[in-house]
Amino acid sequence: MSTQTDAATGVHPGPVSGSALADGQSGWSPHVQRAGNPFDKLHASLVPEIERIIAQYEDRRSGLIPLAHLFQEHEGYLSPNAVAAIAYHVHESLATVESTISFYTLLFRKPVGKYMIQVCRNLSCLLNGAEDIMAYARRQLGIGHLETTDDGLISYEEVECLAACDRAPCAQVNLEFVYDLTRESVDAMIAAIRAGTYEIKPLAQTVKPGRTWKVEQDTGRKSAGGMNVSDPNNAGGIGDASGIVMFDLIVGKAKYETRSTERLVHETQLRPELSENGHH
Amino acid sequence: MPTDLITPVLTKGIGELNLRDIKVYQEQGGYEQLRRAIVELSPKEVADICNGSNLRGRGGAGFPTGRKWSFLPKDAKTRYMVCNCDEAEPGTFKDHMLLEETPHQIIEGILIGAYAIGCEHAYIYIRGEFKRGYEIMRDAVAQARDAGFLGDNIFGTGKRLEFTIHRGAGAYICGEETGLLNSLEGKRGEPRLKPPFPAIKGLYGEPTVVNNVETLAYLPYIMRNGPEWFANVGPQRSPGYKVVSISGHVAKPGNYEVALGTTIRQLIYDCAGGLRPGRKFMGVQPGGGSSACLFEEHLDVSYDFDSVTKAGSMLGSGAMVVFDDTTDFVKAAYALIRFFSHESCGQCTPCREGGHWIQKTLERILDGRGVDSDIDVIKSAAHQLTGLNLCALGDSIEPFLASVITRYEDQFRAYIKKPAEKVAV
């Protein structure tokens, strides 16, 4: 694999001066330290852990999901900053990271509540009264499947088999198992969460969640590069944060010829130190 | 409960001993077989022991483990051992228990397997939902590393064995071995086109063996007691012990470790305490959500790979879901179809579209808007999408659905004739 050399030599795309990223813009760049920016601070503190995770694998890209878990643990969801940082560390494009994390239901691309209640809706639980438990929980919470309460405290999802069928109906709260659910235990759980006395710790929350964390299917009208970049119609091009990360990666991997002529010209104008054929 | 049916091997000590502690596990003889394998035996000798035990994969397909290993090219420099702990088959909860209760026997099994195939870097892929299990495994691996069972110079032999724990992020399809490998490589967990099989081209393009947790966990015991000990239990072609997860409408759901060849009736009535008082048996899914339903006439079928297949279903992951006469089979079928439709990775049109269509049709029936022809449409769609997909997920849609429609067509017809109350699912 092409990235194996990167893993072996530990070569990173080097720092570039004169980044186009302005302070406060969405999207993280390895080249800009935004003073007082909480994500930059978080990222800096996580670098040793990130390196340790990636070193466990023969290929950097294998670190993609573990890094997503890591950032989500600290931010509560995968922010555009986190996606850009993951892309940088695993030496892949933003589009690649986006497309990969969107495959997995435990990786949230929008903020969720501090308590994520996931009730099993599969066969064994259904045979043991999950239907009633789910209807009851929805009523007590006042929200539906894949929704978050207005105060941003509780998110609710109905999920597939959790592998705890002997103690059905079951659920997970912040990925900790809760077994043998009854209406009473659901009541007690919700009450304790609301009172702040629940035994399971809350998830990190850096941004107040909206009604749902479900991401609508992209119709493909935007250019590649992923969602929530500074300008969706120019995502992945030079001039915005995601473009810079991608650009560095392409150069770092010497896959310069794969880019379009239009972008090449644009980039050469922005980075006069590059010669016409695109090499240093 | 007549305890003579229950034969704890992997489940021995669970609930009594803290087997997460490496000292306790070693007091039970733990890691002794790893030492013996690495210090005293050649990889081929270890593989021969496995072959001699006739151990078949416990993850679902039941493929002979030794034979799977033998497919690795002899001249390959790099080989990988990957342990599949992405347990998500509806009704299965054995790996969940083994992971949380006995992480060390899993590690020992993986390392013995890795040594046998000449692998220097083993991976375990743990389902994303098993956060607790992941933490337990992480602690156990740290203990094993401190004890010198992992690393650069194991038992002073100069042999190297690395171990990485990888946590998934919520996708049933990553239990499929090539989907798992893609996910482990940091990609979408989409199954690959086969051939090439992982034994030729697997993780990072290198020859790879993917084995289930339970399969590998049996290795230390097969080494300790000899291959005959395992091979002589149960039917000759499908021998050994198996952890069976029994759930649904039984008095005592749980994991029961028995010899293969125990009958389905014994498992339900003697191990799991039978049905609840006053209830009548209506059916059982013998091998997880992907298996066809078996009925009363199958109760005396021997629970082993070949006999269950002969009875028209499959042993699968060894998960039995029992149904009594309160079961609404339309809803049961719907729950499983919705599952497969939800978990389809979307690469193959028959699975992606077919599953979705069947789900929508069942939704319509449950909603009281069904028409008579719906039943034939469902049966035909489920049959037509089978066999046209990259992996077994699409092929898992038909068995249960077809078996219960055939047997309990009246329940489906009743919904069409007389709409039920509003369905909340």
Image (cartoon, rainbow, N blue to C red):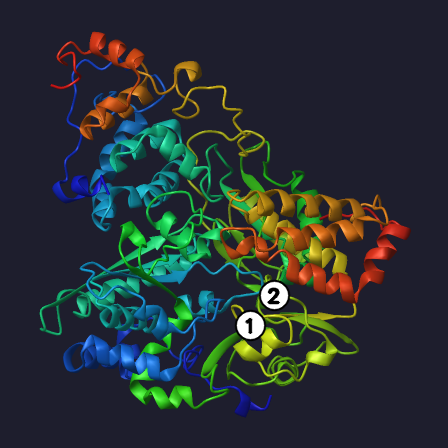
Q: Residue furthest top?
A: A269
Q: Mark 2 lies on which chain?
A: B
Q: Residue at x 54, y 38 (%)?
A: A153
Relative horizontal placement of residue A82, taking residue B356 as reference (left or right): left
Residue B18 in sight from this viewpoint: no
Q: Which mark, by number, is residue B291?
A: 2
Q: How crowded is mark 2: few (under 14 residues within 10 Å), some or many (20 or more)?
A: many
SS for dot 2:
loop
Could you tell me residue A46's position as x and y percent?
Answer: 25, 39
Which residue occupies the foreground of this view, A188 or A96? A96
At 58% across and 65% down in the image, what residue appears? Answer: B288
**Quarter assignment of residue B289:** bottom right
- Please give left or right for residue B74 compared with residue A136 in the image: left
As drawn, the label of residue B315 is 1
For the residues labelled 1 and 2, say whether their Cβ atoms are less than 8 Å apart.
Answer: yes
Place residue B327 in its image quadrant. bottom right
Is residue B223 shown left or right of residue B189? left
Which structural element holds mark 1? loop
The image shows residue A190, relative to residue B207, as above or below, that is above
Quadrant of the rendering where the N terminus of chain B is positioned: bottom right
Q: Give the image location of residue A121, x and y in percent.
A: 63, 53
In this rendering, the answer to whether B397 lies above or below A105 is: below
Residue appearing at x 49%, y 88% in the figure: B234
**Residue B165, position as x, y percentages in the image:** 31, 57
Amino acid identity at mark 2:
Ser
Which disc, if any, is residue B203? none
Is there any visible trace of residue B121 in the rendered image? yes
Q: Distance between the residues labelled 1 and 2?
A: 8 Å
Could you tell which of marks 1 and 2 lies nearer the N-terminus? 2
